[in-house]
Amino acid sequence: MSTQKGNNTRSRPQKHQNKSSFKNSLHDTSHRTKFINNIQVSDVCTRCKDVIEWKIKYKKYKPLTQPKKCVKCEQKTVRKAYHVMCRDCGKKLSVCTKCCQSKEIIPAPPDQEEQLKLDKELQVLLQSLSERKRRTFLRYMNKKEKDLGETSEQKKDDLVKKLNELNVKDDSEFGDLDDDDDYNDEEDVSD
């Protein structure tokens, strides 16, 4: 902008324009940079998540070397940088662990142990189904995977509910088909 009085509009584009976006791992391939790039931001609201992701993207993120003191429980349990509350207190109070406001919280992705346990449960339940019901469930599960808005708990409850529905349904509506009613033998129809 010009410093001239009353001139609020610029008549030219900015002088130095970026031709490519910033890459934080372009010249720095250290273990610390790789660690920072792999951080999963969770247990915070969407605004705080965007702030922390911006810090990671533009190489401004400084990880903690020592655990910090939680503002609620006064214990040294805060292990993530820029957070002021530990994960347990944040879940108990259902607030963001960075800004301490009760907004919609982005949950953490499930651990590997939880994921393996869930997969084993699903495999056992799938083996008890007939082939037709198994394929129906797999189609339903693939459809749900495309919807990313659900949390792991919601997804697990929804899949278990669908499995129970498939187990409860009787085969009587499909199993007792009479050939005489539905399939007529070819008859010679003469004109």
Image: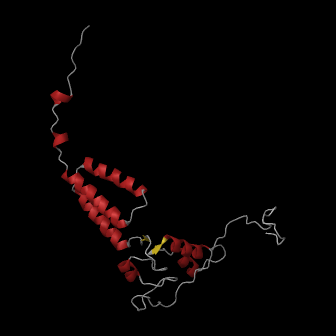
Is the C terminus in the top left, top right, bottom left or bottom right quadrant? top left
Q: Quadrant of residue 86?
A: bottom left
Image position of 114 (left or right of 21): left
Camera-side residue: 130 or 51?
Answer: 51
Q: Position of residue 106 (x, y in %)?
A: 44, 70
Residue that extends furthest to the top in the rendered view of this protein: 191
- Left or right of 172 in this view: 32: right
Q: Nearer the viewer, residue 182 or 79?
A: 79
Give the image location of residue 184, x and y in percent: 20, 24
Towards the viewer: 81 or 181:
81
Colour option used: secondary structure
* Point 27% across, 60% down: residue: 160
In this rendering, position of residue 87 left or right of residue 184: right
- Residue 160 is at least partly visible in this image: yes
On screen, residue 185 above or below 26 = above
The residue lying at 24 percent from left, 59 percent from top is: 125
Residue 126 seen: no
From this viewpoint, which residue is outermost toward the front?
Answer: 6
Residue drawn 30% across the image and 69% down it:
117
Judge whether 103 appears above or below 160 on screen: below
Q: Quadrant of residue 36?
A: bottom right
| Quadrant, the N terminus | bottom right
Residue 20 is situated, as x and y percent measured from the top left of the image, at: 70, 65
State the image coordinates of residue 62 (x, y, percent, origin top left).
Answer: 57, 83
